[in-house]
């Protein structure tokens, strides 16, 4: 009986010590004694709404210094639009601090996502998409491969006054590009195929000055999927807009 009594007393003593600690860590008590009364948000904000970050953090800060769950607060901030990474810390005695890194969009990816300049995909819903982004697409595992071909082809055609608007790699490994000519604004679809994509694009670039000299026609499509040649589809060049007749003043 004495042994049972000693065990009971020992468990009671442990509970009396542990329960206040548990209560503080869970925010049941002590909020008013150790409040997180200051929010500090740092980062370069171009698209992230700093006030939205603060609103998300307030419920977590209200738990108090010891009870705030930093992982939960960080996850809540990261779910906001344009947030690539967030790091939440607490500073004694009353500061909750978050450092935010924004996504910097590099390209569109498919129909519903954007690609950051760090190679990360993120949703395009509920965000204002910047104009002029190239359109890239392919399996998610091929992001770096698609970006590499886009960068290489952009450098290849830039000297010719041609912009690469889109690069797509389909599920079978076949490449397709879309170009735009700076002088005429005409667009050209390029079917590259699965093999020797860079060599085929380099061959097309060498021929482009000659192809662009056809003033009466625009190159609508180039099929490079041939071993020793290519197939071209031409479209009539748009007619120039008529210039208004100038009025000549006459004197009498």
Image (spheres, rainbow, N blue to C red):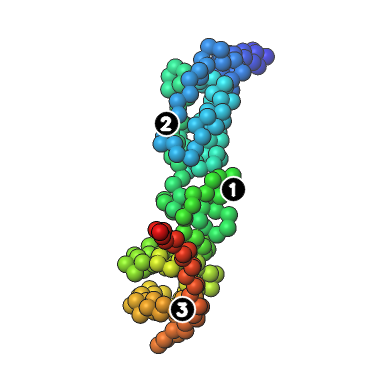
Which percent across, then down, holds residue 151? 38, 62
Write down the residue under mark 1: 125
Query: x and y percent of residue 245 in the render?
Result: 46, 64
Report the disc number at residue 29: none
Q: What element carries label 3?
A: strand
Q: Categorize mark 2 by other alpha carbons within 10 Å: few (<14), some (14-19), many (20+).
A: few
Q: Which of label 3 and label 1 is nearer to you? A: 3
Q: Tell me the distance, in whole angstroms, between the alpha carbons under discs 3 and 1.
A: 39 Å
Rendered image: mark on residue 217: 3
- Residue 42 disc label: 2
Asked if residue 113 shows in the view, the reply is yes
Q: Are marks 1 and 2 in contact (CB under 8 Å)?
A: no
Quadrant for the N terminus in the image: top right
Q: For the point 36% across and 66% down, which residue is it?
A: 161
Coordinates of residue 15 in the picture (x, y in percent):
60, 17
Q: Is residue 167 visible?
A: no
Alpha-carbon span between mark 3 and mark 2? 55 Å
Above or below for 93 versus 206 = above
């Amino acid at each position: 009986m004495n042994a049972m009594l000693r065990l009971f007393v020992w468990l009671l003593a442990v509970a009396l010590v542990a329960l206040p600690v548990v209560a503080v860590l869970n925010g049941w008590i002590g909020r008013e004694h150790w409040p997180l009364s200051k929010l500090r948000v740092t980062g370069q904000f171009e698209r992230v709404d700093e006030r939205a970050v603060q609103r998300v953090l307030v419920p977590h800060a209200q738990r108090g210094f010891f009870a705030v769950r930093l992982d939960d607060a960080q996850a809540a901030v990261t779910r906001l639009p344009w947030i690539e990474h967030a790091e939440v810390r607490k500073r004694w005695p009353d500061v909750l601090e978050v450092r935010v890194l924004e996504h910097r969009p590099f390209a569109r990816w498919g129909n519903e996502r954007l690609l950051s300049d760090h190679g990360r995909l993120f949703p395009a819903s509920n965000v204002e998409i910047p104009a002029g982004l190239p359109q890239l697409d392919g399996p998610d595992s091929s992001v770096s491969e698609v970006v590499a071909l886009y960068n290489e082809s952009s450098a290849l055609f830039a000297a010719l006054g041609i912009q690469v608007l889109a690069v797509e790699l389909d599920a079978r490994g076949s490449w397709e590009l879309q170009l735009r000519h700076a002088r005429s604004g005409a667009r050209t679809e390029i079917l590259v195929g699965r093999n020797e994509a860079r060599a085929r694009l380099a061959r097309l670039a060498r021929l482009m000055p000659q192809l662009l000299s056809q003033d009466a026609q625009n190159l609508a499509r180039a099929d490079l999927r041939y071993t020793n040649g290519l197939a071209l589809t031409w479209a009539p060049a748009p007619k120039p807009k008529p210039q208004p007749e100038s009025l000549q003043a006459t004197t009498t």
